[in-house]
Image (cartoon, rainbow, N blue to C red):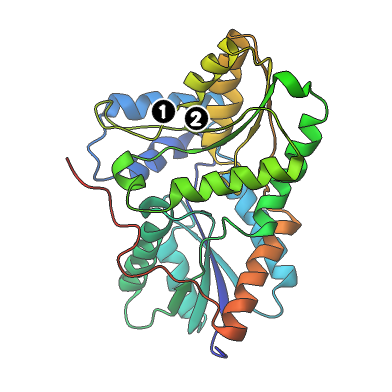
């Protein structure tokens, strides 16, 4: 039993909420990576085409509001890695409010350095910035295999596949690509493969099922997970596929990467090669994710059911 748990902390990536936020946000994301200014300006223009707004922060507010209704007297806080509310500011508020031990739900579902261990580092850095009064914060485990995460993809894919010819329709799962050096040291790719299999089996789909990658960045000489979604669409068109149902299984909610890389770039590529493109929704901040967070919290408080990462898991990628 952990009777001292007295708060829930939602930790997310963060996103700009207006044109003036875009470059400062991107500078936070890329700090320490020596990204050329012209590359930042290029990405900023993508955001500007969508009004300079990522949907992520609004969805986090909705998730937090849902949790506050159902969290059974546990206060709910929210902090981001890269944009306001910044994680250190949130931890400082928690300390001021007298919180002693919070359970942290990180909105990245899978195991990798960038989606799991780096958030642990962010939490510890925020606690260090606050100092001796900072609460203890225990990160809840990755949730890639939980029904509350997978079942919405099954439902969305089932509805979309039912409206398309089975023989020439492919089910494509997408996720953020990683450098292969990072992917080799974690279970990220294997977990995504398992989720895609569960989605395909749940729909009864017997046509082509493919895992593709999106949102690659960084120097071109560094290998990343493949195939890229654009390359896969070209191949599928050559194989006679006329319809693609895309399930963004790498994401709990609509990051800008989902909106831009799938709804804009991939959709245009599909049209160019003659494929009917349909992207199903992410689970979003609705009832299923709220139930997911509360189930993880209940497990942690009742029986110590935290599947914490081993000390050596998900290490940073090797440097060339």
The residue most toward the left is: 320
- Look at mark 2 in the image and give the residue it sits on: 47
Q: Which residue is drawn at 22% across and 37% down?
A: 34
Q: Residues within 10 Å of mark 2 (few under 14, many from 20)?
A: many
- Residue 126 sits in which quadrant? bottom left
Q: Which of these two is toward me, 288 or 131?
A: 288
Q: List x then y, in percent, for residue 21.
A: 46, 40
Q: Would residue 152 be found to the left or right of residue 41 on screen? A: right
Compare residues 274 and 44 and report the one nearer the observer. Answer: 274
Image check: 236 left or right of 120? right
Given residues 62 and 211, the one toward you in this image is 211
Real-space Cα separation, disc 1 to disc 2, in angstroms: 7 Å
Taking 215 as reference, is 241 left or right?
right
The tally of labels here is: 2
Q: Is residue 245 left or right of residue 229?
A: right
Disc 1: CA contacts within 10 A as few (<14), some (14-19) or many (>=20): few
Assign a secondary structure to mark 2: helix
Where residue 243 appears, as percent x and y from the top left, is 69, 19
Query: Answer yes or no: do the residues labelled 1 and 2 have beta carbons within 8 Å?
Result: yes
Q: Quadrant of residue 196?
A: top right
The label on residue 43 is 1
User: Residue drawn 26% across and 29% down?
Assistant: 219
Task: Answer with the quarter of the image where residue 221 lies.
Answer: top left
Q: Position of residue 79 (x, y in %)?
A: 49, 61
Q: Look at the image and tell me whether residue 1 can be seen.
A: yes
305 in relation to 220, above or below:
below
- Residue at (38%, 65%) from the top-left corner? 120
Q: Residue at x 41, y 28 (%)?
A: 43
């Amino acid at each position: 039993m952990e009777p001292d748990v007295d708060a829930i902390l939602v930790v997310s990536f963060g996103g700009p909420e207006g044109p003036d936020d875009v470059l400062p946000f991107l500078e936070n994301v890329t700090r320490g990576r020596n990204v050329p200014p012209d590359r930042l300006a290029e990405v900023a223009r993508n955001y500007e085409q969508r009004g300079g707004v990522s949907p992520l922060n609004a969805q986090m507010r909705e998730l937090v509001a849902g949790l506050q209704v159902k969290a059974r007297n546990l206060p709910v806080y929210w902090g981001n890695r890269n944009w306001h509310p910044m994680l250190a500011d949130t931890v400082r508020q928690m300390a001021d409010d007298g919180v002693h031990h919070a359970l942290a739900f990180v909105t990245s579902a899978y195991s990798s350095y960038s989606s799991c261990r780096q958030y642990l580092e962010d939490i510890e850095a925020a606690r260090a910035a606050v100092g001796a009064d900072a609460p203890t914060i225990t990160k809840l485990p990755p949730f890639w295999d939980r029904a509350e995460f997978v079942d919405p993809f099954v439902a969305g894919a089932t509805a979309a596949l039912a409206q398309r010819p089975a023989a020439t329709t492919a089910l494509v799962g997408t996720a953020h690509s990683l450098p292969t050096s990072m992917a080799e040291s974690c279970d990220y790719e294997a977990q995504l493969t398992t989720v895609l299999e569960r989605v395909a089996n749940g729909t009864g789909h017997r046509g082509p099922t493919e895992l593709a990658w999106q949102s690659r960045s960084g120097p071109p000489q560094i290998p990343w997970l493949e195939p890229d979604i654009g390359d896969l669409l070209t191949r599928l068109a050559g194989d006679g596929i006329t319809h693609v149902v895309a399930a963004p299984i790498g994401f709990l909610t609509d990051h800008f990467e989902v909106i831009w890389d799938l709804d804009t770039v991939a959709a245009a590529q599909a049209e160019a090669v003659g494929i009917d493109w349909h992207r199903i929704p992410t689970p979003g901040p609705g009832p299923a994710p709220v139930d997911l967070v509360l189930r993880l919290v209940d497990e942690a408080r009742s029986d110590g059911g935290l599947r914490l990462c081993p000390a050596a898991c998900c290490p940073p990628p090797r440097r060339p």
